[in-house]
Image: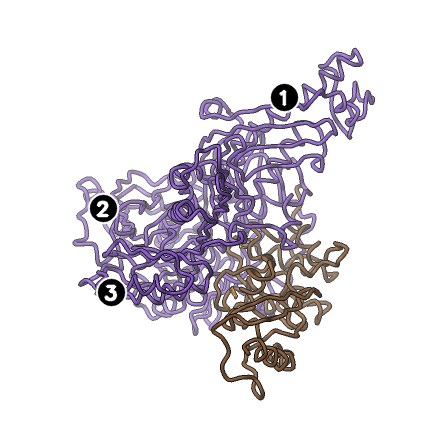
Chain colours: A brown, B purple
Amino acid sequence: MQSLGVSAAAASVAANAEATAKSGRAGGSDGDAPSVMGPNPIDLTLTVNGVKHAMKVEPCTTLLEALRLHAGLTGTKEICDRGSCGGCSVLIDGVLAVSCLMLAIDCAGASITTVEGLAKADGTLHPLQEAFIRHDALQCGYCTPGFLVAGAWLMASTPKPTLPQIQQAMAGNICRCGTYTNIFNAVLEATGQRPLIDGTIA
Amino acid sequence: MSNQANTDAATLPPLANRPLNIGSSMNDDASRLDALAKVTGAAKYGRDVHPANALYIAFVRCPFGAATLESCDVDAARAVPGVVEADVSKRQGNYHGATVGHVAADSPLSLRRGMAALACRWKRKGDVVTTIEQGIEAEPELPVDAKAMIEQAGDRTLDATYSTEVQTHSSLETHGACVDHKGDSAVVYVSTQGTSSARDGLDEALGLPASKFEVVCEYVGGGFGSKLNGAGKEGMLAARIAAKHKRSAYLFVNRAEEHLDTGNRPSSRTRVRVAFEADGTIKGGHIQTWGGVGPNRGGGGVNVPSGRYRLGQITTAHADISLNGGMPRAFRAPGHPQGAFAEELMLDEVAARCGLDPLALRLRLIKADAIREMAELGARLIGWDKRLVNGAQAGPIRRGMGMGVTSWGRFPSSVDAEVVVNRDGSVEARTGTQDIGTGQRTVVGIVTADAMGVPLEAVTVRIGRSTLPPGPGSGGSVTTVNSAPAFMEAGKAAATQVLELVAGRTGAPVNELTIAGGEVRRNGAKVMAWKDACALIPDTIIGKGRNTQKTVAADKTTGTSGGAQFVDLDVDVETGVVKVHRIVAVQACGRVVSRKLAESQVIGGVIQGLSYALFEHRLLDRQTGAMVNPNLEWYKIAGPKDMPLIEPVLWSKDKEAAGPRPLGEPPTIPTAGAIACAIYNAIGVPVRSLPITPDKVLAAMAGKGGAK
Ligand code: FES
Ligand code: FES
């Protein structure tokens, strides 16, 4: 019964996934979803980086928890768990979202990309990952996945972002170690532009 | 920079190939050895380890500045499905976040429900102390000598009080540990700045002999001083629960708890009373400081006078004020940024009173020649000649420039280094230190490669495990300065052993052999490929190196790291908003091991200083003592749009270039002071209280806040 209800919910959620993702909100599905789900675990399948992950989660599970605890994808970080650091950023059908503010069940049927999915299957890195390495755009590295996902999302829509556009795209991300300068340089270089600072030892 | 209307940043010449960095680095181009793991999400931090069947643990905490626990339903918590343990042993809390018990459950969700079922009812205890001012009974009298000096100086005295707020470390990976329990052994993943010391006490907590467990800490999501306390109470509790239930156990605190109970830079109040002469010479006076600390006094020191300037005869006194707030811990240059803020702004105020340029005054007062040279260089780079006199501008947007200086001494630390060479030519550099983001892993690799003459790619660095030879904790900027000599020695010892084997095989004298370009050479000519040379190794070769307190004392190649920073900013006097446009940070760190990583350290230190100057403020409710902003939306940390153009300049010269010097801490010391001076320059009134938020700027402009 539970499982049946959930499949229906999942299908409905899938239909709404795009709208949900576009609005950037973890909205409930209206229409034919059951009015009550849980609290017991329900079946859910998430498509992450092209791979299907079947799991049993309680309906209140966030996408972030589902990724880290149930799909074993720990590249996506939990830092604030309330939408104010960007560390948990993922792409949902190509749109940037913070996974700590989304319910996992709202993402059934969507195509989710995490930091683990930025490189190609053969290991070829995303140009931004390469540029992060070259420009030392990371120290402890804990904020790095979030910045990379936000940067990749920006690059997908804006081939030559200006510095203010880069700052705007990353305005939801925090780095405590203070790597912003190098992050900007990495995005500029990855989009074929001149970095701001390239100090050399003379 | 985010402001397109600002033409200054836009018209700056590109920095590529500007002769900024004077000196040479051991490796200009190397990227971090762990960068690939970090950009692909493969790097496993302690918080990322989730063993199957683990117990999840959370602390029960006091929600107010001072309160008594009147009731709590431990039985209800225990009855929640999945909860295996609920224990509340204490009844009192004297700061928000003080721990009184814990709950353990077999999933994060059961844990949350168990915590909620406790339904703790707390009763607040009377008044709480949330500010230093509340704890000061009376302003102290001047000591006799200082009093006489100040009375004699008449008008040429400054009496000013400077204050700073509590800054939390806010490491993005919170404090905690995960114990992977394997029956008669365990692996303990800890987020720590001291891999080797995190082992202490865990044997007892785990009920296992030291040989039966290992501390692993391959990646750490920041620490900044807050993770120097071994496994911490988080690790100890996780270990005890793992031992008791013979199960894996996971305890990482959440963001709120991280703000409340894992340390902070304490608040400060500094009252300066000094006498000066017409030419700005400071005759002396008295500086009284207070530190706003936790319920247990201690840790509130304010480093002023810093000793970097000639300030005449200064006497000092200090008192810690106990607040009903979380306890301080070492935070990147403890006591220094708050002291430098008071000292630098005081100098600008004296300069203004004497009608002097604050750079000119400082050049006279700075004690160390190297720092004076760095200040001259920084002034040129920022364009100090364009600086206007204080408060000379009209209009809504006013520009200001300011400066500050820094220095940091070398603290000794013991390091045991091992360099292993295998028969296949691979090299392993091993020590039980950790990389909290400083790049220590890469530094060890570069030094080892340099010592041996092999390429960096040939070296694998093994750190972050307590079973390795003991390595340094990441505190006091000690890791690079103390590991470099140890790995130099170990690398050379290992290389010599390989060369001896080659000498034995070929008959060439060992002292004529060198390693370079993937081969063993004699007088520049190839004798044997590196791989072939290593194939002569019977088993493995181990080169050892050691740095001790004694060798440090005898080592004259390294010493203090000085620096000078310059700030160029705008203040919007209608809104009070400060926009920093450029910061030039000239920083000495002796011989640079890795240019890219050293620049990152400088940039990071500057950004933390900027964030401290303008935004960060732990806000305690005056009535309840509860922290009202234990999160990252209201506890504001500088973000991408707050960034100026930051220009790090690595400075090294003469004998100072011989060996590495400390670098982690010094670049974060002068930034806040330099920003405060630049704001003073822009608006003509000093804002003597950090963070310099728009309300304080507006109050100062209205003539109220300046002397606060
Ligand atoms: S963890 Fe999701 S935004 Fe911070
Ligand atoms: S690199 Fe440490 S938080 Fe960004």
Above or below for B317 versus A184? above
| Residue for badge 3 | B122
Query: Given contact means CB atoms under 8 Å apart, are the residues at marks 2 and 3 in contact?
Result: no
Where residue B209 sits, quadrant-wise, is top left
Q: Are marks 2 and 3 on the same chain?
A: yes
Residue type at mark 3 is Trp
Q: Three-letter amino acid code at disc 1?
A: Ala
Q: Residue furthest front?
A: A1
Could you say where residue B148 lies in the image, as x and y percent from the top left?
Answer: 19, 42
Q: Is residue B257 above or below residue A93?
A: above
**Residue B494 pos. (x, y %):** 65, 23
Residue receiving disc 2: B150
Neighbor class of circle 2 (other Cα within 10 Å; few <14, some 14-19, many 20+) is many
- Depth check: give the residue in front, A51 or B528: A51
The residue that mark 1 highlights is B493
SS at mark 3 in the image: strand
Check the residue under mark 3 and report the chain it is in. Answer: B
> Can I make out residue B361 in this image?
no
Q: Quadrant of ligand 2?
A: bottom right
The residues bearing labels 2 and 3 have C-alpha atoms spaced at a distance of: 51 Å
